[in-house]
Image: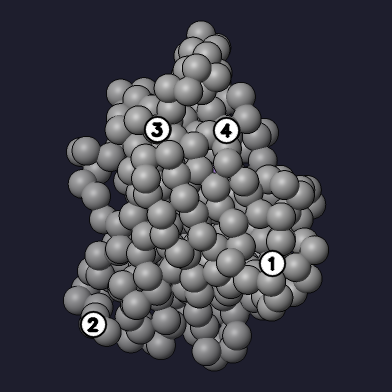
């Protein structure tokens, strides 16, 4: 376990600008999921393009998985809370994602992959976040990292909140994915917060970074300016105002929430299903390249 090496004070805390309830849908070969970050929020939450939450004890909801499909132009970050998912891709990559682990996949110029449950019963729960790439990186070589749960840095704040640092930095602890903002301008922060009692968690955030909280156990309360509070209930996303210098979250025993933030790209977003580029012409090129079998080699 890493010990936090710095402390700080949030002078002006962000408030909850909008509360979002996810939309039930199916994707892949019929996997039941909740789409929390939908297309209409892509501008507001730039550089994030999508957040899906899946969670079921019933194999009929997840068993069909996500057979071969392409991606181009962005990154997918899959965080598994419970269950096992095997992925295989057209570059020869293969890995098993399981309880508490993360797959960070950079589609770049394109690959074809499958994401299939490797269990016939039991609970399958997790998240998939889509993170945009800047125009100059959309055609970079594809790649991915499988990060096992044990390799995700964790620490307890002095107050006692358990923080899993998937990306970015919190209280001086670098995440499993910590890339220089000069090379990866989206500069993502991805934290999983576990509360074991009535506790408060503070995180500084640049006002330019778009940020949201998603609650997957219990509920959180944001402490705003002048003593105001804002509740974010179970299975709700709270979009945070771009004000102030950080966020102050209060949870109670059993509360778990994701805190996600990133630097917006301010570039045009053109999406056609699993392709996210800047222009319609680039989308047409993506379809043509995929149909011609030019992905993942
Ligand atoms: Mn995929």
Specify whether residue 41 is in view: yes
What residue did someone put label 3 on?
A: 296
* Distance Cα–Cα, label 3 vs label 1: 30 Å
Q: Secondary structure at mark 3?
A: loop
Q: Nearer the viewer, residue 28 or 34?
A: 28
Q: Earlier in the sequence, mark 3 or mark 2?
A: 2
* Distance Cα–Cα, label 4 vs label 2: 39 Å
User: Is 115 left, or right, of 56 in this rendering?
Assistant: left
Q: Nearer the viewer, residue 99 or 168?
A: 99
> Residue at (30%, 63%) from the top-left corner?
176
What residue did someone put label 1 on?
A: 55
Q: Is ligand 1 less than 8 Å from the beta carbon at label 2?
A: no
In front: label 3 or label 1:
3
Given contact means CB atoms under 8 Å apart, are the residues at marks 4 and 2 in contact? no
* Distance Cα–Cα, label 4 vs label 1: 22 Å
Q: Earlier in the sequence, mark 3 or mark 4?
A: 4
Q: Secondary structure at mark 4?
A: loop
> Residue at (24%, 50%) from the top-left corner?
179
Q: Is ligand 1 less than 8 Å from the beta carbon at label 3?
A: no
Q: Secondary structure at mark 1?
A: strand
Task: Sort mark 4 into few (<14), some (14-19) or many (20+) by Cα contacts within 10 Å.
Answer: some
> Would you place residue 195 above or below residue 226 in this image?
below
Q: Is ligand 1 less than 8 Å from the beta carbon at label 1?
A: no
Given contact means CB atoms under 8 Å apart, are the residues at marks 3 and 4 in contact? no
Given contact means CB atoms under 8 Å apart, are the residues at marks 4 and 1 in contact? no
What residue did someone put label 2 on?
A: 3
Measured from the top left, where is residue 114 in percent x and y? 55, 47
């Amino acid at each position: 376990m890493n010990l936090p090496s710095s402390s700080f004070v949030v002078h002006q805390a962000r408030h909850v600008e909008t509360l979002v309830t996810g939309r039930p849908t199916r994707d892949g070969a019929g996997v039941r999921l909740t789409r929390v970050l939908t297309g209409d929020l892509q501008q507001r939450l730039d550089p994030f393009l999508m957040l899906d939450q899946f969670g079921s004890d019933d194999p009929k909801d997840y068993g069909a998985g996500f057979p071969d499909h392409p991606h181009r132009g962005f990154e997918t970050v899959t965080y598994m809370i419970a269950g096992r998912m095997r992925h295989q891709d057209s570059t020869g990559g293969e890995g098993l994602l399981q309880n508490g682990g993360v797959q960070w996949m950079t589609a770049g110029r394109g690959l074809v992959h499958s994401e299939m449950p490797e269990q016939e019963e039991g609970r399958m729960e997790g998240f998939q976040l889509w993170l945009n790439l800047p125009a100059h990186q959309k055609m970079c070589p594809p790649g991915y990292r499988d990060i096992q749960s044990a390799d995700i840095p964790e620490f307890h704040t002095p107050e006692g909140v358990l923080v899993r640092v998937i990306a970015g930095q919190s209280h001086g602890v670098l995440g499993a994915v910590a890339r220089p903002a000069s090379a990866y301008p989206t500069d993502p922060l991805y934290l999983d917060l576990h509360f074991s009692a009535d506790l408060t968690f503070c995180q500084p955030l640049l006002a330019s970074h778009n940020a949201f909280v998603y609650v997957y156990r219990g509920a959180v309360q944001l402490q705003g300016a002048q003593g105001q509070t804002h509740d974010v209930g179970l299975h709700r996303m709270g979009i945070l105002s771009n004000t102030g210098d950080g966020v102050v979250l209060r949870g109670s025993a059993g509360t778990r929430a994701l805190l996600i933030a990133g630097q917006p790209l301010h570039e045009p977003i053109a999406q056609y299903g699993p392709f996210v580029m800047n222009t319609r012409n680039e989308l047409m090129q993506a379809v043509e390249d995929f149909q011609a079998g030019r992905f993942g080699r």
